[in-house]
Image: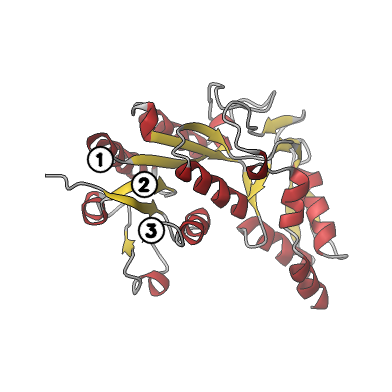
Amino acid sequence: MIKPVIHNRILIIGASGFIGNTLYKELLPYYDVYGTYASQEGLFSENQVFFEFIAEENSIIEILNEVRPSIIISAIKGDTKTVLKTHELLCNYVTNVDCRLIYISCAHVFDAKGDFPSYENDAPLAESLDGKLKLSVEKLIRQLPKEKFVIARLPFVLGVTSPIIIQLKQAIKHQAAFEVFPSLIVSATTQSKVAQQIHYIINKDLNGIFHLSSEDVMHHDELFRDISEKISHKKPIFKNVFSRNDDHFLAILPKVNLLPKNYRITLEEVIADSTLKDEIITLKAK
């Protein structure tokens, strides 16, 4: 027998990851938040609200029955078979209790297209493994009643502590190579803005598909050259990679499900948020 859910209790699956942990920190002061981790045991194993969950080895059911969340946020990664199985179980759980599922997807569900930016109601088409997996999970989730789910698609996620910005800073520091894609046109956001937006979606009980992205686009190489210039007077060795001859888009934009103005972001703000002044001073001093 499935026990009743506990109101305002959130379970973040993948709470030890970059996006999941950002969401955990944002939501913790306002909700009863639990999370799962797959690695970094020393950091999370002593935390009573974190459960070890390795999708290839465990079933999510035991954790669901113990936590009894009213909101599930899925930000997990893994191989196709186990990720799909986990989301089948999540959808079954959500169907049978008073619970909503928020799935963190990405722009790669459109990566087989490329002639234009993609909007919420455009038909996805993926060619990469990650894009195909995300799209398969989206199809599962879209079988739920509309009020039961949110699909939050993310573009490139930057920010001071994002993996790609850390990689860029290391490339600047060591005068190492950093790959950029001059023919690729992208949108972007920051981890802090994504956390604010998801918080708003939960608080306002919204549902449907959201593109949590900047309102504008930019060439990939220009974006990272601009960020590099603001971080330091030094430069990495920018390595131009041309996956196609012509310009193509890997960009999602919000159009249908627009959030209030203060929950939107521009690429100018993304660049500023990814190059905070104290970080610039620290790097230049080295």
Q: Position of residue 272 (x, y in %)?
A: 76, 55
Residue lying farthest to the bottom in this orientation = 286
Residue 210 horizontal side relative to residue 160, left or right? left
Q: Dividing the image into 4 quarters, which one contains the C terminus?
A: bottom right
Question: Mark 2 Cα within 10 Å, few/some/many (few <14, many 20+)?
Answer: many
Tell me the quarter of the image containing the N terminus.
top left
User: Which residue carries the number 3 mark?
Assistant: 33
Helix, strand or loop status at disc 2: strand
The residue drawn where x is 63% and y is 44% is 263
Residue at the outermost left position: 1
Specify the label residue 93 is tagged with.
1
Q: Position of residue 104 (x, y in %)?
A: 48, 43
In the foreground, 10 or 31? 31
- Closer to us: 47 or 205: 205
Q: Are marks 1 and 2 in contact (CB under 8 Å)?
A: yes
- 52 relative to 111, above or below: below
Residue, disc 2? 72
